[in-house]
Image (tube, helix red, strand yellow):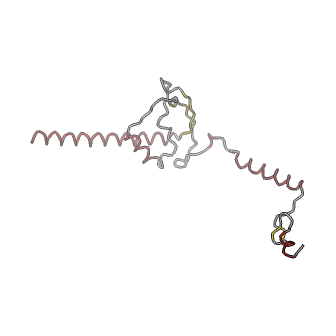
Amino acid sequence: MTKLNQDRSRAPGQVCGLDVLPKFSPMKLLQILAVTSLLSNCAMMETDPPQSRLCEVHKIPLAEKTGYAPSQGTYADPSMDYINSRRRSEYLYPHLSPWYLSERSKTGWEKKEKVLICPQCEIQFDKAYSTYRAQKSLQNKSIAGMQERVVKNG
């Protein structure tokens, strides 16, 4: 064999005649796999029960709420005002119950669902949304009054 062919014929795991793969015994390899498997399982397990988690804003424990979600094929559509309010408020009140969750079962809302909510987030969002609706109503009345005056005065 020529020198050129000798360079090309090398053992697996070697690059330019140097070992690049560490040499482990099969037992050592099994030990490494067992330890990494255990560590990865520990990282995925949740140590705190869901009820002990806290609301980031209010620093109180989250409560479990049971409600009814729309069944498959049921069309649920909130108003645009409500959608915009929820979108603007999601950082102020991070643990609201989902908009589609109903407290009572009704036709089309038979799928039972449990969610974690912050009672203070719910209360404060309801107040803020009520205030928003009242202001919106006053604006609409004001606009309607102006339109009426324009029509009367021609």
Image point (19%, 40%), residue name: 145
Task: State left or right for residue 112 relative to residue 136.
Answer: right
Q: Is residue 146 above or below residue 112?
A: below
The front one of 29 and 127 is 29
Image point (16%, 39%), residue name: 148
Q: Is residue 106 above or below residue 12?
A: above
| Furthest-left residue in this view | 153
Q: Position of residue 95 (x, y in %)?
A: 52, 43
Task: State left or right for residue 103 relative to residue 16.
Answer: left
Image point (44%, 46%), residue name: 87
The front one of 33 and 2 is 2
Residue 132, quarter of the rendered image: top left
The front one of 67 and 48 is 67
Image point (41%, 42%), residue name: 83
| Furthest-front residue in this view | 1
Task: State left or right for residue 142 relative to residue 48.
Answer: left
Task: State left or right for residue 37 relative to residue 84.
Answer: right
Q: Position of residue 107 (x, y in %)?
A: 47, 23
Quarter containing the N terminus: bottom right
Q: Position of residue 120 (x, y in %)?
A: 49, 42
| Furthest-top residue in this view | 107
